[in-house]
Amino acid sequence: MSPAARLAPAAGPRRPVSNKPWVWRVQGLLSTYLPVLLMVFLAAGTSWLVKNSPQPDDGGTEAPLRHEPDYQMQGFGLQRFDPTGGLRVEVEGREMRHYPDTDTVEVDGVRLRSIGQDGSLVIATAQRAVGNGDGSEMQLMGDVLVQRYPTDGRGGAQPRVGLEIRGEFLHAFLHTEQLRSHLPVRVSYGHTELQMQGFEFDNLKGRLLFKGRSTARFESSAARRSKPSSSAP
């Protein structure tokens, strides 16, 4: 299979299908993951941070902008609630800085948490996050870990991770709904694991471009049944 694959748009209600091409499965994973990850950080509002943080009093004079933070926050936490009072998005960080010359927000030791309307949960952590002041782009860098816990059908999240993404870099674009990484990324979903040396995913066009050597591993149901069962810790 060539590194670039044109993927079909998402289908309607899921039906049992056997021997489905693995690129379709990957497209399904990313289509589920991308909008949620964008909402986790961007819905928390880098633009909200910029607009609502105190601005320094310049005394009416305009000084040349330098790449120095005009404000910082340490040990901060932000929460967003829906109209009914339910927690939807939570962002925590060791330190946040805003740079007026580039209108960007940087967060060290970031932890992102998003609760979907169906009760599903997404948690993302990274050593550093960088977002535009208008909330159009986000980058996660260093020990990036994204975990999605599907809904249990009762308004909460299941205790087991449904989707996990690990890597050193992810770059998300809100307006064009694109996700990129020039560094290796591992995607795990149930008994499926995908290793990519780099990729570009366009959610609007339904197109996934692999970079370098990419591999996928699928564990058969027979192999799973042959494994000895183990109790939870």
Image (cartoon, grey):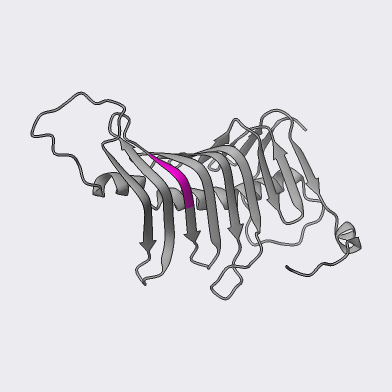
Relative horizontal placement of residue 188, taking residue 52 as reference (left or right): right
Relative horizontal placement of residue 154, taking residue 221 as reference (left or right): left
For the point 51% across and 53% down, the residue is: 36
Q: Residue furthest top?
A: 64
As displayed, is residue 14 above or below residue 97? below
| Near-viewer residue (197 or 128) | 128
For the point 59% across and 37% down, the residue is: 168
Q: Is residue 137 magenta?
A: no
For the point 41% across and 43% down, the residue is: 107
As displayed, is residue 106 above or below residue 10? above
As displayed, is residue 2 above or below residue 50? above
| Near-viewer residue (81 or 96) | 96
Q: List x then y, in percent, for residue 75.
A: 38, 51
As displayed, is residue 167 above or below residue 190? above
The boundaries of the magenta stretch are 106-111
Q: Quadrant of the N terminus?
A: top right
